[in-house]
Amino acid sequence: MVSKVQIQNVLKALAVAGAFMVPLAGFPLAALVAKKLYGDSVSFEKVKEVLSQLIQMKKVKQEEVSFKDWLVFSEMINVQSPLNLLKNREETLVAFGLMEGDLVAKRKGKYTIDDAIEWLKGNPEDGNYVIYGDGGTNRYFVYPNGDIKFSAGHAMYPSKQTIQKAKDLGFQIH
């Protein structure tokens, strides 16, 4: 676990280097500090650990934490977005909600994200589970390891923009 002293030293070094020309908060600040601490081995879990420390240190307020900020900033520091229903369910559900809207994200029944989670609880060994997006047009494949991929072949029209939105939110494309 990273210490508060290590984080404080990185914050001081960044301030001296003039890294805060634009104020950073929440995930972007945590991601920047984590990148400095861990280099290329930075991961979403390490960013969350740094974020937790920053909140405890009162350098970040809880209300400044936005998963949407994480998705945008993760592209800048080359951190793979964590869209996996077993490993990072909360973040995956947020990305799905941003892609499909809250009504679809909260829908119950067959071919829903809720049903995919139930399928995963059965420890499937192979195959995949299909989730239907808004109106059944967008589709997602969930794999036994929890990965969730957006189906380019089922993208809602205009498909180029829909596929780009899925990529921007961190979905792998199938």
Image (cartoon, rainbow, N blue to C red):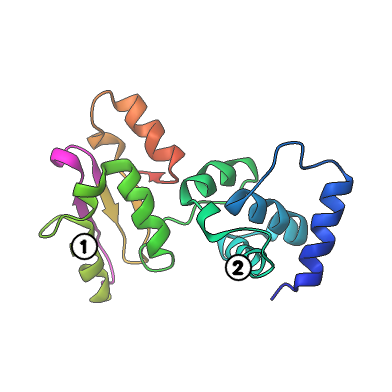
- Residue type at numbered disc 2: Ser
Is residue 91 shown above or below 150? below
Q: Position of residue 32 (x, y in %)?
A: 70, 51
Residue at x-position 20% and y-position 48% = 104
The numbered dot on residue 114 is 1
Does the magenta segment cover residue 45?
no
**Residue stretch rendered in magenta on the structure:** 124-139
Of labels 2 and 1, the one closer to you:
2
50 and 109: which one is in front? Answer: 50
Give how far across and how far down residue 73 sits, in percent: 58, 44
Q: Is residue 87 left or right of residue 24?
A: left
Element type at marker 2? helix
- The image shows residue 113, relative to residue 159, as above or below, that is below
Of all residues shown, which one is farthest toward the left?
109
For label 2, count other residues whose C-alpha is less than 10 Å away and answer few (under 14), some (14-19) or many (20+). Answer: some
Kindly report the distance in space between the C-alpha atoms of the residues bearing marks 2 and 1. 28 Å
Give whichever of 143, 81 is nearer the camera: 81
Amino acid type at image mark 1: Asp
Residue 112: give x, y in percent of width and height. Answer: 18, 56
Q: Tell me if residue 132 is in the magenta stretch.
A: yes
Q: Earlier in the sequence, mark 2 or mark 1?
A: 2
Name the disc covering residue 26, or none. Answer: none
Task: Name the residue tied to disc 2.
Answer: 52
Q: Can residue 110 be spotted in the picture?
A: yes
Give the quarter of the image for residue 86: bottom left
